[in-house]
Image: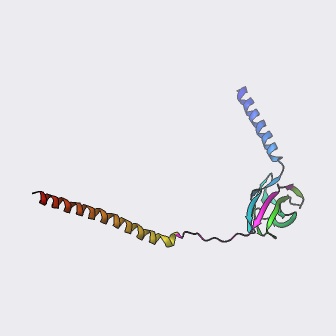
């Protein structure tokens, strides 16, 4: 009985210690997308951050900085933001800054270097919807040619056999 009570007390003490350590983790913010030294579109580029140590929807907010200038504040608890346009195109440094409810800066993210460039809308080279009927017709024609050649080959070999049998007798 004493061992059971001792193990329960040890478990409770461990649980209390772990919960206090987890509650005291410092707030941090990290840019997780785009990765460092990557190409991004110069219009509507998505930036995703990971916030730990605080809840973003309890009044904390974060700002996105491009080349040491704040360009976008996210106060809705989201972990994503969209950069509408990089000016000019080329290399840019992204940084996210986390603020508390009072507006005091509590964490700064890693700096991510990206290359902003215009992205052309590309149409697929192979249009499946347009090519499917053509490929179907082609497959049917090839199948018919194979069947016809086998049929004609058997027919001609049968004629040759009949001709050789009639010539032999």
Question: Which quadrant of the structure image shows residue 75?
Answer: bottom right
Name the image quarter holding the N terminus.
top right
Name the image quarter holding the C terminus.
bottom left
Question: Which quadrant of the structure image shows residue 33?
Answer: bottom right
Q: Residue furthest bottom?
A: 130
The verdict on residue 111 being magenta is yes
Residue name at image x 87 percent, y 55 percent: 106
The verdict on residue 1 being magenta is no
Residue name at image x 74 percent, y 64 percent: 40
Considering the whole magenta stretch, tell me its main secondary structure. Answer: loop
Residue name at image x 49 percent, y 71 percent: 131
- The correct choice, above or below, for 152 with respect to 109 in the image is below
Coloring applied to the structure = rainbow
Q: Do we see residue 19 in this rendering?
A: yes
Q: Do we see residue 60 in this rendering?
A: no
Q: What residue span does the magenta drawing correspond to?
A: 107-127
């Amino acid at each position: 009985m004493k061992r059971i009570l001792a193990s329960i007390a040890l478990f409770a003490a461990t649980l209390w210690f772990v919960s206090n350590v987890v509650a005291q983790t410092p707030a941090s913010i990290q840019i997780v997308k785009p990765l460092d030294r990557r190409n991004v579109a110069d219009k509507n580029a998505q930036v995703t951050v990971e916030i730990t140590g605080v809840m973003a929807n309890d009044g904390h907010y974060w700002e996105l900085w491009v080349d040491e200038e704040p360009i976008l504040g996210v106060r809705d608890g989201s972990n994503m933001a969209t950069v509408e346009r990089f000016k000019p195109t080329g290399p840019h440094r992204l940084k996210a800054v986390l603020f508390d409810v009072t507006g005091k800066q509590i964490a700064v993210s890693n700096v991510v270097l990206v290359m902003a460039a215009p992205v052309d809308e590309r149409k697929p080279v192979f249009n499946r919807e347009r090519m499917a009927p053509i490929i179907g017709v082609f497959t049917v024609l090839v199948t018919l040619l194979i069947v016809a050649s086998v049929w004609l080959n058997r027919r001609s070999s049968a004629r040759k056999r009949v001709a050789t049998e009639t010539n032999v007798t």
